[in-house]
Image: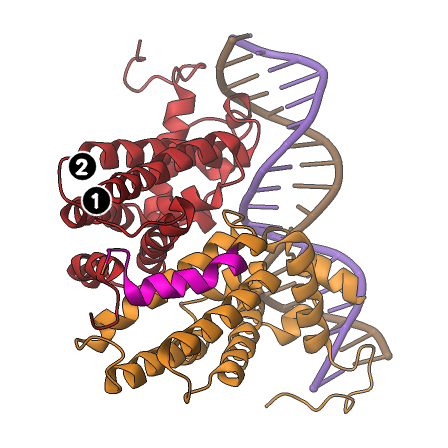
Chain colours: A red, B orange, C purple, D brown
Amino acid sequence: MSPMPGSRPYHHGDLRAALLAAAESTLREKGAGSLSLRELAREVGVSHAAPGRHFKDKQALLNALALAGWERLGQTLETVDDPALPLEPRLTALARAYLGFAVDNAELLELMYARKHDPEASERMAAAVGGLTQVIADAQERGEIIPGDPEELDLLPGVALYGMAAFISGGMLSPEAATASVDTLVHHLLHGLRPR
Amino acid sequence: MSPMPGSRPYHHGDLRAALLAAAESTLREKGAGSLSLRELAREVGVSHAAPGRHFKDKQALLNALALAGWERLGQTLETVDDPALPLEPRLTALARAYLGFAVDNAELLELMYARKHDPEASERMAAAVGGLTQVIADAQERGEIIPGDPEELDLLPGVALYGMAAFISGGMLSPEAATASVDTLVHHLLHGLRPR
DNA sequence: ACCTGAACACCGTTCAAGT
DNA sequence: ACCTGAACACCGTTCAAGT
């Protein structure tokens, strides 16, 4: 299906995928700010109007990128999660995986969170966050977590992990400092900052 | 040194301030995405090149906006902080004030965090965050917080508050839900999610 | 000193026309 | 079906010229 090397076929073949791949590498190298449809088209070797055939507009391409990101993150977390583990090691493993993703895909993660108004992306986001919800629910059932409204209990881990990922994306926290602090953070989350 | 208001009787008297004011209201009404220097100039009734006299480029205007935001937030937190209070009420009051700011200035706060690479804004940010550091340090001295590296102890409250503000800006958390949950969040922060 | 108007090099998006 | 090229309405930034 791929054309002869050096030839420039009129039809690209898989322009959509090529655009997404180019977009993700630009995102990683130069940040979301310097993502332009026209430049993407140039990189891929196609006219500036061609992307319009596959993405309604720039937003749609961004949404597709975010969607794929949520899918990848969700799968990663699912793979890592071990429901048989006690609460603290289970949550620590998930937190490590999440922050690992944040370190490796800082710009993408930022974009993923920014696409929260896209219904499809929101769904994947909810699914990823839902994993956390499940961990809390399981732990509560086992008496490893205080009783109370699950939504209220999910909030702290949710915002803490989100915040930490954002600190990484934003350069307020180095990847090294982040990975060095995850375990302690999870511990504080569960045990509190007050003396017991 | 910025010029005294009124000392320059031309058009708006102080184009710089007028541009910043227009920018902040556009930010509030239409979001950061639709902030254009040319439109700002139009709103203020000046040529599209005029803003260039007061801001080196668009980034500089954004930085100035963020800087003012950090200043306002810092002052608010300083006003609210009462070092005489025990840890939990003290931290709760600060958290409420911070989230109140996040609710009232969602787009601005997003921009404030995005400007973290501007040295001046970073300084104001550090100052605002430093308030939190002080609270933890004071509490540790009084034995209200477990011993340990202050940086490690600051991290959880820092990322949690940041994350919550981001949830508000991003619409993942309604202002009502946020204000209803602050106190509980702070409580969980201090007491942990595990049964004691 | 402060501002304008024109100019330049970009954008995203649309659409008739080509393949 | 897929892509091109031209066109349109925007940008940010610069700079000679005006007042």
User: What residue did someone put label 2 on?
Assistant: A80
- Closer to the camera, A83 or A16? A83
In the rendered image, residue A83, in percent from the top left (x then y), is placed at 18, 35
Which residue, given by chain and number where applicable, does mark 1 sit on?
A97
Is residue A172 visible to the viewer in this orientation of the structure?
no
Which stretch did the figure color magenta?
B178-195
Label 2: element kind: helix
Q: Is residue B151 above or below residue A83?
A: below
- Distance CA(mark 1)–CA(mark 2): 7 Å
Q: Which mark is residue B82?
A: none
Identified at 30% across, 20% down, the residue is A6
Question: Residue D10: image x %, image y %?
Answer: 69, 48
Q: Say which amino acid is labelled 1.
A: Ala
Which quadrant would residue B104 be assigned to in this image? Answer: bottom right
Residue B163 shown left or right of residue A179 in the figure:
right
Of residues A80 and B21, which is closer to you in this image?
A80
First in sequence: mark 1 or mark 2? 2
**Residue A159 appears in which quarter of the rendering?**
bottom left
Q: Position of residue A28 (x, y in %)?
A: 33, 46
* A83 or A93, nearer to the observer: A83
Query: For the N terminus of chain A, which image quadrant?
Result: top left
